[in-house]
Amino acid sequence: MSEPLAERLRPRRLDDYIGQQHLVGEGAVLRRMIDSGRISSFILWGPPGVGKTTLAQIIAHRLETPFYTLSAVTSGVKDVRDVIEKAQKGRFFNEASPILFIDEIHRFSKSQQDSLLGAVERGIVTLIGATTENPSFEVIRPLLSRCQLYVLKSLEKDDLLALLERAVTTDIILKERKIDLKETGALLRYSGGDARKLLNILELVVESESGDVVITDELVVARLQQNPLAYDKDGEMHYDIISAFIKSIRGSDPDAALYWMARMIEGGEDPQFIARRMVISASEDIGLANPNALLLANAAFDTVMKIGWPEARIALAECAVYLATSPKSNSAYLGIDAALALVRETGNQPVPLHLRNAPTQLMKELGYSDHYQYPHDYPGHFTEQQYMPDALKDRRLWHGQHSPAEEKLYQRMVNYWGKRFEE
């Protein structure tokens, strides 16, 4: 039995690698590191099928260094220690550290991650981790601080089209068939930027036909409806259905939110993933219009951690309905993005003297904290003074949105600051 198409087409050289030019293109950070012959530990974060494992294998081949692989799904602490011991014994003086690649590192427990720390810190191994989940949630802070983080993106349309063309013209099996890529819209739509899913679908469609094959959108849709599990279910759950779920909450449709949640539950989705996305939605989409939404989302996350399936579905459903039926505001989300853009535009503006800390006599003599007015000493616990840097003192970043709850906050600001907040 031959290898799957996705495995047969896995690139062996960096020049054949498709996508992620921000990391491996000419002059990009990973390309420079690889060309130098020395790499430091890093974690690759991105959706399925964008080349995380392939990139790690190319790097190991290019550097001609021992390459060890562990899967977080099947490996325990003992496996980690065994690999570290092998790497330590097999390394020659002044030779590049062996590479330890850990797929799905987000599934490693804290104790498994702790067992890696010393080896990474002393350079016994160079760690390359791959994850589809936000490392800030899943990777312990000491390990994360010892690794660079590189974000991989879903493949663009041009990348996917190039991959399709390579498949039908260079693959040892497909090139023997006459394949006409007449339409590619459905292939690209179902793949969702996932190269592995794209190649799985292409292989399914080609194998379902005899003789010459003309790929059309109608043919792809027909074959996938007959084979609902033919493409990567995990990818679909993570990127198609979770998108529909969040948009249903944002659009205030509790029925649709429950439906898409049920689809995820039936599909075997990790309940922590669902809970995390609701925490994000509570901040991004409900925000100050109903601050209790974030409290409930965090409570649902805690409940999931404590009780798991199947009872956790009740807490998740309660939270989903609450978020969907809550008033909506994204003013905090827009505000922090505006603030970040302003910081990038204006750089490190000096803190006004009256806002600076003055723990030493010298700082006091230099005027640090002079003329600062303590708000609690004034009626209503407010007195007008400048808090922004001098060059930005008139800039506005937060703009209240007039839902009932947020209107109270906005009106308070108008009462305090007058024209500065009048819109």
Image (cartoon, rainbow, N blue to C red):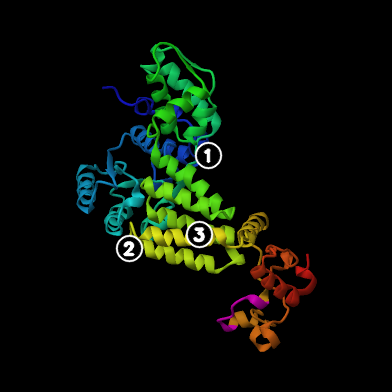
Among all residues in the image, which is located at the extreme front?
255
Q: What residue type is labelled 2?
A: Ile
Q: Mark 1 points at which residue?
A: 22
Residue 84 part of the magenta segment: no
Quadrant of residue 139 in the image? bottom left
Element at badge 3? helix
- Answer above or below: position of 272 versus 8: below
Q: In this view, does 184 lie to the left or right of 59?
A: right
Does the image show residue 355?
yes
Q: Which of 333 and 83 is in front in this view?
A: 333
Residue highlighted by disc 3? 321
Residue positioned 48% across, 55% down in the render: 277
Label placed on residue 307: 2
Q: How far apart are marks 1 and 3 (CA)?
A: 40 Å
For the point 41% across and 46% down, which residue is it? 132
In the image, the segment drawn in magenta is: 354-361
Relative image position of residue 178 (x, y in whole percent): 44, 12
Sequence-wise, the earlier of marks 2 and 3 is: 2
Three-letter residue code for mark 3: Val
The residue lying toward the viewer, choosing from 341 and 123, is 341
